[in-house]
Amino acid sequence: MKISLTFFLSLHCIFCIHAQNLVPNPSIEFLTPYRCPYLIDNWYSPNSETTDFLSACSGQTPVNYFGIQNPFDGIGYCGIRTYSGPEEWSVYPQYREYLAVKLIQPLERDSKYKVSFKYSVAENAGYTCDRLGIVLSEDPIQGSGVLNYMPQIENPTGIFLTDSVNWNTISGDYIANGGEQFIAIGNFYPDNQTHAMYYKANPGIYAKYYTYVYIDYVEIVKDPDYIPYLLIPNLVTANGDQMNDSFKISTNRNFTAFEVSIYNCWGAKVFESTSQTFEWTGDTMGVYYYQITTNKSNTYKGWVHVIKQ
């Protein structure tokens, strides 16, 4: 009985290690009381705009200028403007607010992570839009105005954010390139690529002409069950039997950079592609040399035999 219990506890501890949230202060709290409400722990505004860090320690949750919302976790959350309506374009053109943080440790190459955060549209916001996402980067995320980054996890285009009662989740799986240690949340698209609409008949005075979204509990957790693979065949039998009819790779990885080159026995290049979904059926029978280069300059080399009947 002791052995079984020990085994169960061991498995449980191993899972806990793998399930570590890599986001420091994930519920966006003032962990140092005397800093409230002026200096939030870990989080910051990457474009130096007035991102709002709201907390009960400053009397700004659950009631604040932008609405009423209980925190999803803890006693605080963040509030950001993700879009300004045409009424403000002359004063605040392309105005955006973001929140950013440095992770506890960099992401590991080819590992899969579950990425998620909670959001709720402020009930006093006059506008809503469809753009809200998270960027993961090796380098610090910074800039001015609309940050020029492509979010890896985001709300689907054309699906407006409208729920001001509940906390909702934006989430997705992310295969790391390796070294990502900074994240930022917000709308990374300019106005002409953001779908917006005026959806409140009687919005509050403080958010009448823009979209304002609460953000809480940000999580990045490594998937312990994910095993990356890259299978490269060494034989092509182009005989139409749907088996080994072409030279192509099989992988569950999504490369940010990819290049394949194939050479004949005299060293002449006979095929090249930058798509990881390439297929090559072979020119003539013989032995060919291939070289595949992926992101992070990982190179795979070898020989493939082409047999034609």
Image (cartoon, rainbow, N blue to C red):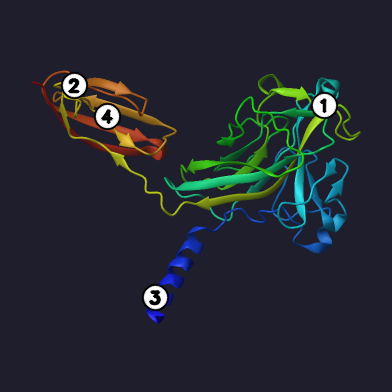
- Image quarter where the N terminus lies is bottom left
Pointer 1: what residue? 92
Q: In which quarter of the image is residue 22?
A: bottom right
Check disc 2 and report the residue beneath it: 282
Cβ–Cβ below 8 Å for labels 2 and 4?
no
Q: Looking at the image, which is closer to me, 74 or 97?
A: 74
* Cα gap from disc 2 to disc 3, whole angstroms: 56 Å
Q: Earlier in the sequence, mark 2 or mark 3?
A: 3
Image-based side of 11 in relation to 277, left or right: right
Q: Position of residue 308 (x, y in %)?
A: 10, 21
Between the residue at mark 4 and the residue at mark 1, the CA separation in whole angstroms equals: 51 Å
Where does residue 295 sit, x and y in percent of width and height? 41, 36
Mark 3 residue type: Ser
Kindly identify the amino acid type of the residue bearing the numbered disc 1.
Answer: Tyr
For the residues marked 2 and 1, what is the alpha-carbon distance in whole angstroms? Answer: 58 Å
Determine the CA span between mark 3 and mark 4: 46 Å
Q: Residue at x 51, y 63 (%)?
A: 16
